[in-house]
Amino acid sequence: MRLLIVVEQTMREAIEFHLEGMRAEGIATPEPHAYATVVEVAA
C-alpha cells in the first residue's frame, strides 16, 4: 500500500508541475476530467 501512496503523490506532483509550466507560458490549462485504463505487461 505504501508504494501506491508514493506513486499517487509523484503523479500529483508531476501534474501540478506541468500545469504551473503551462500557466507560466500563458497556455490555457484544460478543464479537470478523469480517465482510467488498465495496461497488462509481462511479469
Image (cartoon, rainbow, N blue to C red):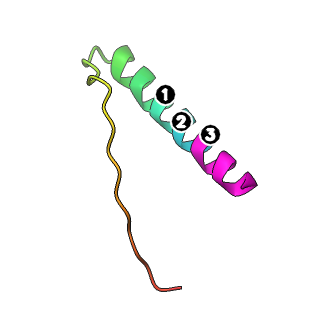
Q: Which residue type does callout 2 highlight?
A: Arg
Spatial separation of the CA atoms under disc 1 and disc 3: 11 Å
- Vertical placement of residue 17 versus 38, above or below: above
Crowdedness near tag 1: few (<14), some (14–19) or many (≥20) residues, C-alpha within 10 Å: few
Q: At 56% across and 34% down in the image, what residue appears? A: 13
Q: Quadrant of residue 19?
A: top left
Q: Are marks 1 and 2 in contact (CB under 8 Å)?
A: yes
**Secondary structure beneath disc 2?**
helix
**Secondary structure beneath disc 1?**
helix
Q: Which residue type does callout 3 highlight?
A: Gln
Residue, disc 2: 12
- The quadrant of the picture occupied by the N terminus is bottom right
Tag nearer the camera, 1 or 3: 3
Horizontal arrangement in the rendering, residue 3 relative to residue 12 (left or right): right
Q: Are marks 3 and 2 in contact (CB under 8 Å)?
A: yes
Horizontal arrangement in the rendering, residue 5 relative to residue 41 (left or right): right
Which range is magenta? 1-9
- The quadrant of the picture occupied by the C terminus is bottom right
| Sequence-first disc among 1 and 3 | 3
Q: Are marks 1 and 3 in contact (CB under 8 Å)?
A: no
Q: At 32% across and 45% down in the image, what residue appears? A: 35
Residue, disc 3: 9
Crowdedness near tag 3: few (<14), some (14–19) or many (≥20) residues, C-alpha within 10 Å: few
Q: In the rendered structure, find residue 38 and report the number of the disc placed on it.
A: none
- Residue 4 belongs to the span the image colors magenta: yes
User: Magenta region's main secondary structure?
Assistant: helix
Spatial separation of the CA atoms under disc 3 and disc 2: 5 Å
Residue, disc 1: 16
- Residue 42 belongs to the span the image colors magenta: no
Q: Quadrant of residue 38?
A: bottom left
